[in-house]
Image (tube, rainbow, N blue to C red):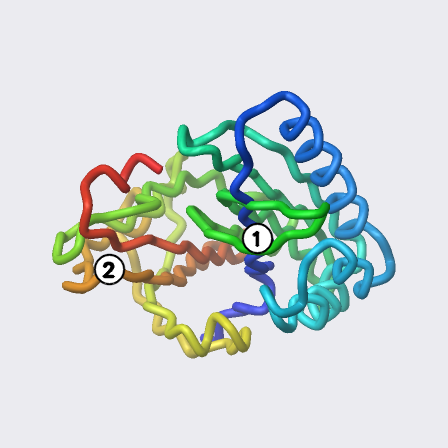
């Protein structure tokens, strides 16, 4: 079955190193409001006024493609904390819905970013966490994602998609796939093999690479009421202190 990666809304938006002073925090809040307005606007090019195209090339084009899939998507941007080194941490959330082939698809995507601003523009970005959840059908299968945001190099860790309520006699199929950087960047939909699952959901133990970097996972659950697809970004770090970021 082909996995709709293009619905994942995986747009790395920002990261801005800010000294923690009240005026600059207020400036960051003002920037967040402008960024949220640009994301929710009809002009995909408006983002170029806030994000240096050299920093995130192709962002406007990716945003335009996403708006074709989810034209009524709603974005929120908020500052959640400082990381203690002067960086502000942003949380970006997108929600959208569309109809295709008689089915309703509902999307929720989120990112956590460390951010740096200069002259009211985004100059650099570090993506700390990202996941998306896309559901089809009229009934939402209640699930919980138990997947870490960061793991140590070489470690083994769990990728679990837990069904919160018993399904009775229903059979659920599912599968898990590691996405390549090219598939994520180009929003390519790979083929994902499905197999019947035991009670409780999808439970897999996976291996982190020996070098720092990123692993991107795609998972799918197929149940009588519809389909749930998930993407999750996992940072692979060599320093245990980075696990808490």
Q: Nearer the viewer, residue 61 or 98?
A: 61
Position of residue 43 relative to residue 203, above or below, is: below
Q: Return the disc, 1 or 2, that comes first in the chain's sequence.
A: 1
Badge 2: few (under 14), some or many (20 or more) residues near its Cα, within 10 Å?
some
Q: Which mark is residue 110?
A: none
Q: Secondary structure at mark 2?
A: loop
On the image, the x and y values in percent for residue 106 come to 65, 51
Q: Is residue 204 left or right of residue 72?
A: left
Q: Does residue 136 lie above or below 244 as drawn?
A: below
Instruction: Give the percent coordinates (x, y) of residue 124.
Output: 54, 55
- Which numbered circle lies on residue 212? 2
Secondary structure beneath disc 1?
strand
The image shows residue 116 at horizontal and vertical percentages of 56, 45
In which quadrant of the rendered view does residue 205 lie? bottom left
Identity of the residue drawn at 68% across and 57% down? 51
Q: Seen from this angle, which residue lies furthest top?
A: 22
- Quarter placement of the C terminus: top left
- Between the residue at mark 1 and the residue at mark 2, the CA separation in whole angstroms equals 32 Å
Q: Nearer the viewer, residue 14 or 112?
A: 14
Which residue corresponds to mark 1? Answer: 135
């Amino acid at each position: 079955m082909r996995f709709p990666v293009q619905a994942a809304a995986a747009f790395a938006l920002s990261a801005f190193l800010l000294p923690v002073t009240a005026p600059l925090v207020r400036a960051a809040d003002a920037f967040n409001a402008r960024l949220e307005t640009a994301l929710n606007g009809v002009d995909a090019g408006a983002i170029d006024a806030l994000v240096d195209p050299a920093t995130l090339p192709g962002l406007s084009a990716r945003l335009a493609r996403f708006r074709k899939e989810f034209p009524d998507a709603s974005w929120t941007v908020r500052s959640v904390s400082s990381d203690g080194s002067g960086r502000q941490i942003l949380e970006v959330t997108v929600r959208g819905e569309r109809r295709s082939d008689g089915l309703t698809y509902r999307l929720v995507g989120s990112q956590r970013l460390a951010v740096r601003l200069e002259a009211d523009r985004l100059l650099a970005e570090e993506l700390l966490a990202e996941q998306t959840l896309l559901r089809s059908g009229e009934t939402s299968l209640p699930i919980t994602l138990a997947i870490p945001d960061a793991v140590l190099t070489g470690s083994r860790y769990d990728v679990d998609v837990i069904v919160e309520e018993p399904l009775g006699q229903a059979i659920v199929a599912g599968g898990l796939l590691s996405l390549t950087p090219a598939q994520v960047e180009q929003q390519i939909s790979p083929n994902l093999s499905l197999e019947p699952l035991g009670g409780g959901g999808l439970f897999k133990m996976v291996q982190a690479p020996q070098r720092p970097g990123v692993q991107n996972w795609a998972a799918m659950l197929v149940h009588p009421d519809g389909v749930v697809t998930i993407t999750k970004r996992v940072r692979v770090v060599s320093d245990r202190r980075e696990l808490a970021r």
